[in-house]
Image: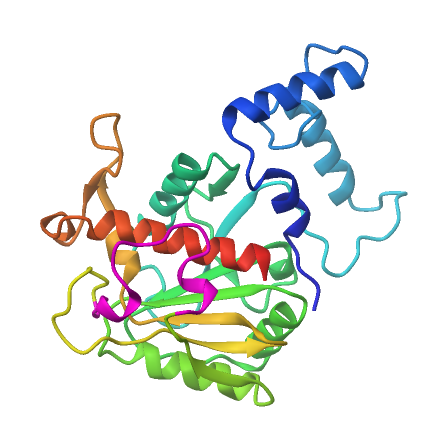
Amino acid sequence: MMKLFLPTIISLIFITPAVAEEATEDWGAILGGDDTVESSTGVIGMTTEELDAYAKEESAVGSEDDEVPEIFVRNRRRFVLREVQFNSDWDCDPTAVPALVHQFNRLTGMDSQALVPRSPVLLDSDSLTDWPFIYMTAHYAFNLNEDESKGLRRFIMNGGFLYADDCLYGQTFGPAFEGEVQRIFPEYDWKTLEASDPVYGMVYKQKYTSSAIHESGVPRVIRNANPWSGLFVDGTVSVLYTPQDFGCHWEISSPPTPTNPLGAGMHGMDMQPGARDAAYKIGINIIFYSFLH
């Protein structure tokens, strides 16, 4: 199974801003002392203009270059989190993805983006495999048609990662999601994840264990914990489902500021100290797991 984003991670995963700046200067010298080299593209040694020209050339219709391979990723140099549109209330957390991406940038220094205004991707789209990580959430049940099912299978078998977060545990989205995934991938196992699974803590080790997370994701036990589950392909999680409604924790009612780096939370989540910060770090852990597995 091919991984779509690993080259970027190898080059960027542990580069701090100071190291990145130093590395850019070194590359500038190697490339002939061109002081116009910038790192803002996420590509050391390539200016914004050069990256834009390259992207246009690669995607141009009728280009004389070799045919674009089936799993070519136009945004391979930065992480882009794409939301999936499907036949349920997929857009129930409109600020969640941009807010998570902002915190991902803030806490890791890596080049990433969300599409604003929102531009969801469809599972039957030919461009689906341009995006190594896709995200689904909703309250209610749904079903995928034949083309969407084939598109999702092709995406996963080409190395993509699907993360589904239940917007309100106890509604019908969770059972429908699990049923659709098992229908599309009958030869692979759908399993409950153990607390020791790397997907829980690739980067940040939380101050509490996964068994202390209840439905809303807060670090205290109110009800019996609901474990994460996923589809294992070749020994790793390729489809992840969380019942904790992390998307509602990521949502904001006002943007982050220097004095309030998380922004103002939605749904009363700020009343639970530490919960929103934990939810962002959980999201970052999941993203890094998708990079490295």
**Looking at this view, is 139 or 146 the one in front?**
139
Left or right: residue 112 compared with residue 42: left
- Displayed quadrant of residue 255: top left
Residue 137 visible in the picture: yes
**Picture coordinates of residue 11 (x, y %)?**
65, 39
Please tell me whether residue 290 belongs to the stretch shown in magenta: no
Is most of the magenta stretch helix, strand or loop? Answer: loop
Residue 214: in magenta span: yes
Q: Residue at x 37, y 71 (%)?
A: 195
> Quarter of the image containing the C terminus?
bottom right
- On screen, residue 242 versus residue 27, left or right, reads left
Q: Is residue 244 left or right of residue 81?
A: left
In x, y percent, where is residue 80? 52, 47
Magenta residues span: 196-215
| Image-based side of 221 in relation to 234, left or right | left
Q: Is residue 109 above or below residue 267?
A: above
Residue 97: give x, y in percent of width and height: 38, 50
Which of the two residues, 227 or 197, is positioned nearer the viewer here? 197
